[in-house]
Image: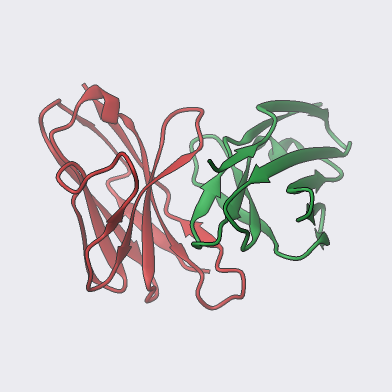
Chain colours: A green, B red
C-alpha cells in the first residue's frame, strides 16, 4: 500500500527552530508538498520538492531525499502564528496526491 | 494562485436529506477535486471532476451518494445525498495551479456539514 508517516504532534518554543519529518512509501514519485492548516481553515501551500536537496523560502525550508523516502520541513524563528497542522503529501506515478495525517505543531511562549 | 469560494460555508442538516455544495474558481482550471476532512484527520479525496466527463471516484465513494457536476471550467458542485451523521465533516474543493511547474493544489475555505 501507499502511506505517509508524520509525527502526530510536536511542541516548540517561540523563537526556536523545529523540524517536522515525513517518510513516505508510494507507487512512484512526482513531487512532495508541504501544506499548513490552521484550525478551522483550509490547507495552504508551503513548499514543493521534486529533486533531492533543500528548498528555502524565508523562515521555512523543506528537504527531500528520494532514495530514503524522506522529507522534513524546517521552521525557524518560530512565531505564535505558526501554531497549526502541517501536512505532507506526495504525488505518485499516477499523479494522485497521497496525504499524510498531519503534524499538529504547538508553539509555547 | 486561484481564488476559490464555496457555498454554503456551513450547514446543519437532518438525516435523510441532501445538500449541494458549490465551488467557484476565479480562473479556468482543468481539474477540480473534492475532499472530505473529519475533525483532527487528514484529507480524504472523494473524487476528481473534469469538465465534460464523468467524475472519477476514489475507493469507498460512489456516484449515487456523492453526485458531482462540472458544467464549465470554473464551477463544480458536490451533493451529499441521503445524509447520515457519519457524513458530518468538512468538505473542501481544490484545484491545481496549472500555471506553475509544481501543480500544487489550492483549496476553497470548506463547507462544515453537521448531520443530526
- Point out residue A86 in the picture as x, y percentages from the top left corner: 65, 41
> Which sits in the foreground, B46 or A83?
B46
Q: Residue A58: x percent and y percent?
A: 81, 58
Quadrant position of residue A22: top right
Depth check: give the residue in front, A30 or A102.
A30
Q: Position of residue A53 (x, y in %)?
A: 84, 60
Question: Residue, x 81% and y 26% (percent of image)?
Answer: A109
Q: Residue B83: percent from the left, percent from the top?
A: 18, 31
Rendered position, A48 above or below B11 = below
Q: Is residue B52 left or right of residue A1?
A: left
Q: Tell me: residue B20, above or below residue B28.
A: above
Which is nearer the eye, B49 or B20?
B49
Instruction: Find residue B115 and report its image quarter.
Output: top left
The quadrant where residue B55 appears: bottom left
Judged left or right of residue B36, residue A61 is right
Q: Is residue A34 above or below residue A94?
A: above
Look at the picture and state if A89 lies above or below A56.
above
- The number of callouts visible is 0
Q: Quadrant of the C terminus of chain B?
A: top left
> For the point 39% across and 75% down, which residue is it?
B27
Horizontal side of A77 relative to B113 (left or right) equals right
* Image position of A46 (left or right of A65): left
Amino acid at each position: 500500500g501507499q502511506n505517509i508517516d508524520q509525527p502526530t504532534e510536536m511542541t516548540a518554543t517561540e523563537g526556536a527552530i523545529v523540524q517536522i519529518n515525513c517518510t513516505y512509501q508510494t507507487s512512484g514519485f512526482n513531487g512532495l508538498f508541504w501544506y499548513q492548516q490552521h484550525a478551522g481553515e483550509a490547507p495552504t501551500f508551503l513548499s514543493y520538492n521534486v529533486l533531492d536537496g533543500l528548498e528555502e523560502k524565508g523562515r521555512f525550508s523543506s528537504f527531500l531525499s528520494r532514495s530514503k523516502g524522506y522529507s522534513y520541513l524546517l521552521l525557524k524563528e518560530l512565531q505564535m502564528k505558526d501554531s497549526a497542522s502541517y501536512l505532507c503529501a506526495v504525488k505518485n506515478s499516477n499523479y494522485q496526491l497521497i496525504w499524510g495525517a498531519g503534524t499538529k505543531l504547538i508553539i509555547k511562549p | 494562485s486561484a481564488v476559490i469560494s464555496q457555498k454554503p460555508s456551513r450547514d446543519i442538516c437532518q438525516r435523510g436529506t441532501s445538500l449541494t455544495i458549490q465551488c467557484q474558481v476565479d480562473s479556468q482550471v482543468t481539474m477540480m477535486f473534492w475532499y472530505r476532512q473529519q475533525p483532527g484527520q487528514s484529507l480524504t479525496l472523494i473524487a476528481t471532476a473534469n469538465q465534460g466527463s464523468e467524475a472519477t471516484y476514489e475507493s469507498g465513494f460512489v456516484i449515487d451518494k456523492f453526485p458531482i457536476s462540472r458544467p464549465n471550467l470554473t464551477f463544480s458542485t458536490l451533493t451529499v445525498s441521503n445524509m447520515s451523521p457519519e457524513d458530518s465533516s468538512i468538505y473542501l474543493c481544490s484545484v491545481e495551479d496549472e500555471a506553475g511547474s509544481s501543480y500544487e493544489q489550492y483549496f476553497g475555505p470548506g463547507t462544515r456539514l453537521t448531520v443530526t
